[in-house]
Amino acid sequence: METIITEDPADLAVAAANAVAAEVEASDRLLLGLAGGSTPEATHRLLAARPLAWDHVEAWLPDERWVAPDDEASNQRMARMTLADPVGLSLIAPDTTLSNPYTAAEGYADEIVPRMVDPGVRRVTMLGIGADGHTASLFPGTQALDVESIAYVANLVPSLDAWRLTATFDLLGQSDVVLFLVSGEAKADAVAAIAQGEDLPAGRVTARESVVWMLDDAAASRLH
């Protein structure tokens, strides 16, 4: 497990923003996956405050909740407010106003899959992790874990009694670089379990070049 450990969530957000900014500056064409959650939100705000050129960057969402686009729980709402709108970044998001999550997932796959397999595009994806080891909306025990194709799918999460839209492992694996942004003691057990080889969803994520775990001290506290 390749790790970068910072002191606290604020330092983690800075480190993540530095990593993403370097990719923005070095790439001719960049597809950037934006994660939900408090640490990515802080990272987005830091990036929005920097004088970066975003005209060659497109952003997408590795997962989305099956809620209206302006719902407070919507990942696209957060991404637009914290980064896309302030800097004029092109954000490609699922259409959650459609009649059902399957139709929305299929339509989004038609947009994202060609971009993720385009050899002329640099692909960097930010992800988080839940205390149960899920990432994106690949939750333990759900059907999306078994989808072996480069796809974006609707996934029922019984533990939440909710539908989610999510990239599959094979789609995430098209990323050149995956950055896991993880903070807080609540995530420490899952991080340690993955480091020890336990089969949790987040531990199954691959990338073409590297998967980097960016942790604060609390999240890394059970690593040996």
Image (cartoon, grey):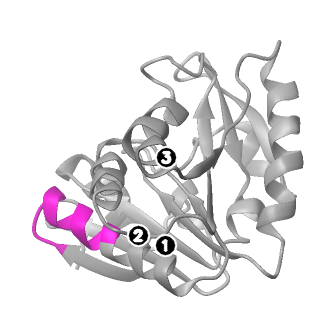
In this view, the residue in front, 211 or 49, is 49
Quadrant into which the C terminus falls? bottom left
109 in relation to 126, above or below: above
The type of residue carrying mark 2 is: Leu
For discs 2 and 1, the disc positioned in front in the rendered view: 2
Assess disc 2: are there few (<14), some (14-19) or many (≥20) residues with their C-alpha within 10 Å of its C-alpha. Answer: few
In the rendered structure, find residue 52 and report the number of the disc placed on it: 2
Which amino acid type is marked by label 1?
Gly
Residue 162 in percent (x, y) is at 60, 18
Whole-percent x, y for residue 178 in the image: 53, 71
- Observer-side mark, 1 or 3, equals 3
Q: List the residue tagged with mark 3.
A: 84
Q: Is residue 131 magenta?
A: no
Q: Which of the marked residues, 2 or 3, is nearer the chain's N terminus?
A: 2
- For the N terminus, give its image quadrant: bottom left
Which residue is farthest top? Answer: 99
| Residue 14 image label | none
Identify the mark at residue 197; answer none if there is no mark.
1
Instruction: Give neighbour class at mark 3: few <14, some 14-19, many 20+ (Cα, 10 Å).
Output: many
Residue 8 sits in quarter? bottom left
Residue 118, picture quadrant = bottom right
